[in-house]
Amino acid sequence: MFILQANDQRLADAKAYLQSLPKMVHSTATNVDSIVDAEQYSLVITVITMSRGQNMTTKDQQMYNLGYLSQTVARLLQIINTDSTASFQHVKLFICNVDTQPKRFAEALDLSGHVQIVSRYQNTTAKLTTNLHEKEKDDYVYCLHAASQFTSPYYLVLEDDVLLDVNAVESVYFVMNYFDLFSATDWLFLKLYYPQKWSGYGRNVRTVVELISYSLLSGFLCASVIWLMPRCCKCRVMPVWFWFAVGVGFAPLLCVCIGRQYVESWRHYFSSTHQLVAAPGCCTQATLYPALVISDLCAHLAHVRSHAKFPVDIAVDSFAHIHGLKRYLIEPNVVKHIGLISSLSKSPSAKFFL
């Protein structure tokens, strides 16, 4: 109930913000071939969307009319209208509608006065497949190709149920600049999201380094506090090094109990504290691609077949393995996944990812 109430509040805020914006006349492009735009953008953002209510009853549609797309687009427009990051000053945002009945997708139609919409199935000649995983992959290829019709060095591909942090663009720019990704050509993507439930401590060098760092910091803090206390204090009975050892031993236990996802959450508040790590194969909620890889990636995806054990995210990851490209993930997430219902299964049974 709390999750649905939070979603209702976000949706109300999103609608209020959208209503405050003036309506705009956008290109009437309905497919890739009809896109005509000669402008040079610093970043192109596309939101892949489809209705989640096609296989639901009217009652279910009313119950699960959660307005994810409206929330996602409103947040993006808010960021675009207020962000002053030097590298991404001219941003293009459009919706890639892959619903098989785009004229019945009311939420997307309502947003057409704020953002441009490109629909894959606007014409009935578009090829359909009964394999939902294959359709998801083909839709992804279509939207990548559609994005590439707008000239830009970078393309950010989002699903329609994610919210970028207000300072997400600033954080991405800092990380790309600090790790010299703007000039590098050996990387396939930078992911902005990875499920928190899989972001805990693992058996790797990074976990050891992080726990040791927090242990030493805790030890120094404990020792400093004790050292600053008056000598008459009972805590001073034990030597300072003892309290240093207590801090060192207590910190990793506390970190493990809390969970890495929450211990590292302090980094959200400072763009300069975000990290760049090797990305796992999972998930396509928010992915940034350099323009250099789009054409070859689309060709690769068009020639592989997706299924339950080889979905689109793994197919994309396989391209990196074949061509020896690096894959990156920004930590902590600069995107929040708000989806309760999967667009792939379209089942009215809630799937909680918050």
Image (tube, helix red, strand yellow):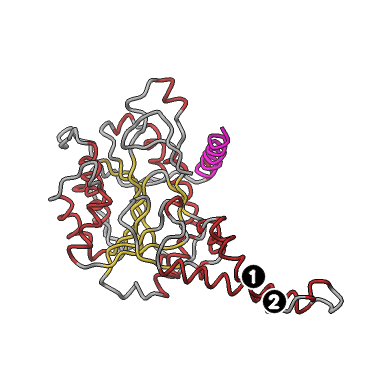
Q: Badge 2: few (under 14), some or many (20 or more) residues near its Cα, within 10 Å? A: many
In the displayed structure image, the side of residue 240 where residue 331 appears, left or right: left
Q: Quadrant of residue 181?
A: bottom left
Quarter of the N terminus within the rendering: top right
Q: What predominant SS class does the magenta segment belong to?
A: helix
Is 58 magenta? The answer is no
| Secondary structure under the numbered disc 2 in the rendered image | helix
Q: Is residue 101 above or below residue 261?
A: above
Residue most toward the right? 232
Local crowd at mark 1 within 10 Å, few (<14), some, or many (≥20)?
many
Taking 101 as reference, is 323 left or right? left
Give 266 or 292, whichever is nearer the viewer: 266
Q: Which mark is residue 223?
A: 2
Which residue position is annotated with label 1? 247
Q: Which span is picked out in magenta?
A: 1-18
Residue drawn 27% across the image and 61% down it: 151
Disc 2 residue type? Ala
Q: Amino acid at mark 1?
A: Gly
Residue 32: horizontal and vertical position, in percent?
21, 48
Measured as percent of width and height from the top left, residue 209 is found at 47, 72
Q: Would residue 5 be counted in the magenta stretch?
A: yes
Percent across and percent down for residue 235 are 79, 72
**Is tag 1's residue or tag 2's residue first in the polypeptide sequence?**
2
Residue drawn at (18%, 48%), measured in percent from left and top?
Answer: 33
Q: Residue at x 70, y 76 (%)?
A: 223
Give the side of residue 73 with respect to residue 152, left or right: right
Report how far apart the C-alphas of labels 1 and 2 lie in the structure: 8 Å
Q: Residue at x 41, y 25 (%)?
A: 61
Residue 59 at x, y percent in the picture: 44, 20
- The circle on residue 278 is none
Residue contact at pointers 1 and 2, CB within 8 angstroms: yes
